[in-house]
Image (cartoon, rainbow, N blue to C red):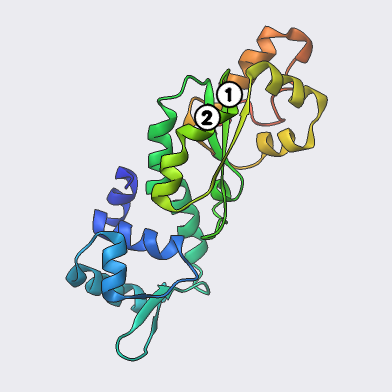
Amino acid sequence: MSDVLTALFGSKTKARILEVLLSNPDQAYHLRGLAQAAGTDSGNTSKLLRVLVEGGVVRALPESPSTRYSINLDSPLTEPLRSLFARAGSLMEDLRTRAQTLAAAYIAVFGSQAAGTADALSDVDVLVVGELSSVSAQAAFKSVGRQHHKSINVVVVSPPELALQLSAGSAFWASVATGPRVDLKGAWSDVAKREAVADPGLGLRSLPAGQDGDPGVA
């Protein structure tokens, strides 16, 4: 769990319970099942659920023999919370830890996970900019996907090829360049600038307009 989320929500327990509910919006949990999934105790989980239900963030679904709980998708707080946890939750932390072990100039999550719109069935798209094979890059993230029950799709591109694709106006790479990304290693702006300098003919066309200082998270 991210230290930032723990600080924001006051405890690791609160952050973990919210993460489980937000990451599985179509699932309803019994109290003990939720506590087990979050790695927390039932007493603290029950106390937090009462607050979240009263605040409208969580729905309580009475049924025999016990109540089930699920995230309230109609709450105005749900989407901002989902976006926050998608960018800073335990999945992203584990991906970031693994990314640091790879010899690559830049690694990031893009697509629905970076945008905060992913659901339980969404793939996690990972971009790797470096001189390594797709097979080795995919294998590097396999254990993280297994741990989080997620399918991780790794796209590998060499720095020169990335610059060439951006210069050529590739629709896919333009969408990656201008869309939301979450940095796992390095910074997008550094990679784009380095390639522009290496081949002056590319100029700043390898940098999308307005993203010269892009921190990597849109």
Residue 58 or 96: which is nearer the viewer?
A: 96
- Judging by the rendered image, the residue that carries numbered circle 2 is 137
Q: Quadrant of the C terminus?
A: top right
Name the outermost residue toward the bottom: 64
Residue in the image at 17% along x and 72% along y: 43
What's the residue type where badge 1 is placed? Ser
Q: What element carries label 2?
A: helix
Name the kind of residue labelled 2 in the image: Ala
| Residue placed most toward the observer, 159 or 80 | 159
The reply to whether residue 89 is visible in this rendering is: no
Residue at screen point 46% across, 40% down: 142
> Quadrant of the rendered structure where residue 170 is?
top right
- Residue pictured at 25% horizontal, 54% vertical: 12
Measured as percent of width and height from the top left, residue 24 is found at 46, 64
CB atoms of marks 1 and 2 within 8 Å: yes
Query: Alpha carbon of mark 1 to alpha carbon of mark 2: how far?
Result: 6 Å
Q: Nearer the viewer, residue 155 or 89?
A: 155
Q: On the rendered structure, is 147 left or right of 38?
A: right
Residue in the foreground of this view, choosing between 17 and 56: 17
Q: Where is residue 95 in the image (x, y as percent from the top left)?
A: 43, 38
Instruction: Categorize mark 1 by other alpha carbons within 10 Å: few (<14), some (14-19), many (20+).
Output: some
Residue 93 in sight: yes
Residue 13, picture quadrant: bottom left
On screen, residue 79 above or below 31 = above
The disc label shown at residue 133, or none: 1
Residue most extreme to the right: 168
Picture coordinates of residue 205, whole percent (x, y): 76, 22
Q: Which residue is drawn at 74% across and 8% down?
A: 200
The correct choice, above or below, for 120 with respect to 200 in the image is below
User: What x and y, as percent, mark residue 78?
Assistant: 48, 65
Residue 122 vertical placement versus 128 (above, below): below
